[in-house]
Amino acid sequence: MGDSLGVVIPAYDPDILTLERFIEDIQDTLEPVTIRVEIDTPRQSYVDRLSKFSEVNASARRRGKGAAIMAGFDALETDILAFVDADGSVPASSLDSVVQQISAGAADVSIASRRHPASHIVAHQTIVRRLLGDVFAFAARTILPTRCRDYQCGAKAVRAEAWDAIGHHCYEPGFAWDLEFVSVAGSLGYEISEVPVDWEDHPDSTVNPISTSIEL
């Protein structure tokens, strides 16, 4: 019997049609035991619609991406925990590649990487967003003890036992959570598998490249 999989999707003001289709793609491609949408300050109509496709945990306040993922991971009871951004920038097929690294026993922590040489970038970010991302990735590799090509790509997976250890040291509620998660995992001695992905930029993202870069 294979490992069970739970997928968390953190969401804030998502494109509801895109998210519904994405959930269906994840279900068809990965067949997880649970897909759990952690959505902040949603319209009730969104909760009703998403509940037809997935578990939904709605927060009346904006918790932030990191807080939403941690709440979802702590609620799952599966062998493998994964999260993916709600905009579908990382498609279900690439999320499957990330998860396969865990289920195959190649690593306890697996992260999607846009900067992997084998990644396929379908639609690039604007020049400003790309420049800020490149500068941040270089700075992070220089400063942090855990060195990766891409800390912020929106899909990661972890074995549940590893999350039990890593989660005790993760507190960041916002977009910097990805960075904290990777840094803690590496500092605790977990080997991190960076996986090439297909990736498509979504210019309607709620991420502000300037304020988020300052936060990070």
Image (tube, rainbow, N blue to C red):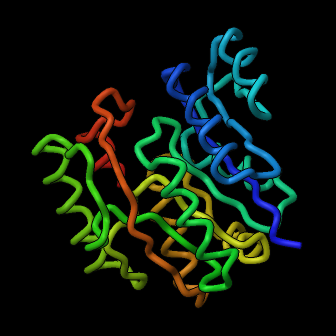
Horizontal arrangement in the rendering, residue 76 relative to residue 166 (left or right): right
Q: Position of residue 118 (x, y in %)?
A: 30, 71
What residue sits 30% from the left and 35% below the top?
208
Q: Residue at x 32, y 35 (%)?
A: 202
Q: Residue at x 72, y 19 (%)?
A: 47
User: Which quadrant of the figure contains the C terminus?
Assistant: bottom left
Q: Position of residue 212 (x, y in %)?
A: 33, 44
- Return the residue found at the far bottom: 189
The vertical placement of 159 against 197, above or below, is: below
Q: Residue at x 70, y 23 (%)?
A: 50
Q: Is residue 9 above or below residue 100?
A: above
Q: Residue furthest front?
A: 28
Relative placement, left or right, of 51 versus 209 is right
Name the side, left or right, on which 131 lies relative to 44.
Answer: left
Q: Please give the count of numbered marks on the rendered protein.
A: 0
Q: Position of residue 172 (x, y in %)?
A: 55, 55
Q: Where 51 sits versus 125, above or below?
A: above
Please state the horizontal and vertical placement of residue 211, each as a whole percent of the image.
29, 40
Quadrant housing the N terminus: bottom right
Give 188 or 104, whichever is nearer the viewer: 104
Q: Is residue 88 above or below residue 48?
A: below
